[in-house]
Image (cartoon, helix red, strand yellow):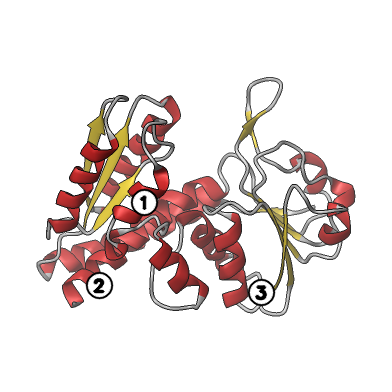
Amino acid sequence: MATIMDGKALSQKLKQQMKLRVEEMKQAGIMPKLVVVLVGNDPASHVYVRNKHKACNEVGILSEVIELPEETSQQTLLEIIGKLNQDSTVDGILVQLPLPKQINEKTVLRAILPEKDVDGFHPVNVGLMSIGDEGFAPATPSGIIAMLHEYHIPIAGKNCVIIGRSNIVGKPMAALMLRHDATVTSCHSKTKDLAQHTRQADIVIVAAGRRNVLTADMVKEGAVVIDVGMNRNDEGKLCGDVDFAAVKEKASYITPVPGGVGPMTITELLENTILAAQRHHRA
């Protein structure tokens, strides 16, 4: 029977530590500030932004939300980003995804200065992370690493299978696990015989966006299973990509949905904002 990895509790613990760090920074005259730009009326995006704003307030980070209407042009958004890039009081800039269809996501993300890109999506930060240099790693993979450390789960030399290859989770997760000396296999929709790979894995990280991608027969006894999925089951309840009830009987550690990786994502965003402020004032 697996130990359930409590992302909520770890998130609270880390936020308490951040609060003390932010207080020290303020005493030194450094006021970390995050600006979130929200375009349109996607209900999920509004919930995420509210949660980010609340988390910033909890640790003492200044937080500003710029809300723009659905019909906002790409040019208008780029002008706002340009002003935030120039504003020396702003340490972190985050444009909430998805964006309305008239706006090119790639163009917008590349317009944010890499040193203010606390989401870690700018190609410069992606490159820095790949070579193991000082940049910003995306929040969800960073949160997963923090959870593995918290539960003293060794990574070096372990076989790690990552299901999913998105730019937000799958690819950066592979880079971070490599940096921590794991042997990494990236699987995706074109992978033949997924179970053959997962049965060899000491650590399985599932970020496919589909229910029950990982079932108990695909997991070896004692494996660590990290579920990044966020789906709804037939009753409308939140669930992940893993058949949680069955897999927890075989795994040694498993993350629940909700309450696993989710809370850690926002916590690591705060961590990146604090780092951005420290680097900004060090420069």
Figure check: 53 above or below 169: above
Mark toward the viewer: 3 or 2: 2
> Residue at the location (34% across, 58% down)?
118
Residue holding disc 3: 154
Q: Residue furthest top?
A: 235
Whether residue 221 can be seen here: no
Q: CA distance from mark 3 to mark 2?
A: 30 Å
Q: Percent x, y for residue 176?
A: 56, 69
User: Position of 56 compared to 191: left or right?
Assistant: left
Residue holding disc 1: 109
Q: Percent x, y for residue 281?
A: 17, 72
User: Position of 62 compared to 253: left or right?
Assistant: left
Figure check: 39 above or below 169: above
> Residue at the location (43% across, 73% down)?
128
Residue holding disc 2: 279
Q: CA distance from mark 3 to mark 1?
A: 34 Å
Quadrant showing the C terminus:
bottom left
Q: Determine the image quadrant of residue 114.
A: bottom left
Figure check: 254 above or below 230: below
Secondary structure state at the residue bearing disc 1: helix
